[in-house]
Amino acid sequence: MFIQTEATPNPATIKFIPGQVVMTKGNAEFRDAADTARSPLATRLFRIDGVSSVFLAGDFVSVTRDAGSDWSFLKPQVLAAIMEHYLSGLPVMEGSNDEADNGLESEIVMQIRELMDTRVRPAVARDGGDIEFVKFEDGIVWLRMKGACSGCPSSTATLKMGIENMLKHFIPEVKSVEPYTDY
């Protein structure tokens, strides 16, 4: 098994590409070891001293180190853990990782989701992260940054100059885009 790595705009995060499916649908983010019970892969990665978060998506795993750790020490350990996981035959996630269907959505929300899914999310996935639509309220689009995008120095510029300008262009009802943080 050959696992590729890519730097991300967030210097604390590296994108690991195992060459196999990581998540068949959706994504999962783990910000501490206590929340990893449903993911044997995330559990294994959090056993490495210095790992502060794990983000799982379609064909990659983004791992963020804590401030006191060095990638030259961590990277070989993360590569080994990912390889060991896939050789073990355990699932990446236990149970279903299907995204919930929240019923009918407004036309504006459907347009926002369509633009996010077709124009934004593929671009940020290349950088090892994801941006999740949270809600549209009073002209404000609330988005949650995930993986390498969470805590990235350029995430504010991405939200304001990139995503906000695009959404305002296509959807006049959008007044601004704001980061949503619930942690």
Image (cartoon, helix red, strand yellow):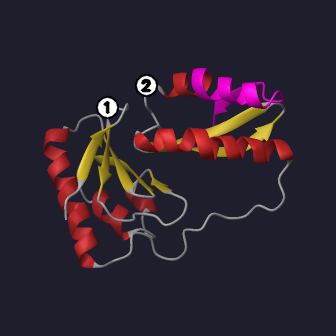
Q: CA distance from mark 1 to mark 2?
A: 9 Å
Residue 159: x, y in percent? Answer: 59, 28
The residue wearing badge 1 is: 11
| Mark 2 residue type | Pro
Task: Give the magenta range.
Answer: 161-183
The residue wearing badge 2 is: 153
* Label 2 secondary element: loop
Circles 1 and 2: CB distance less than 8 Å?
A: yes
- Determine if residue 134 is in view: no
Q: Toward which corner of the image does residue 168 lie, by quadrant? A: top right
Residue displayed at 19% across by 47% down: 75
Taking the magenta stretch, the answer to whether it contains residue 174 is yes
| Mark 1 residue type | Pro
Which of the pair 105/178 is nearer the observer?
105
Residue displayed at 50% across by 28% down: 155
Residue 56: x, y in percent? Answer: 43, 56
Residue displayed at 39% across by 65% down: 21
**Left or right of residue 163: residue 34:** left
Q: Toward which corner of the image does residue 167 lie, by quadrant? A: top right
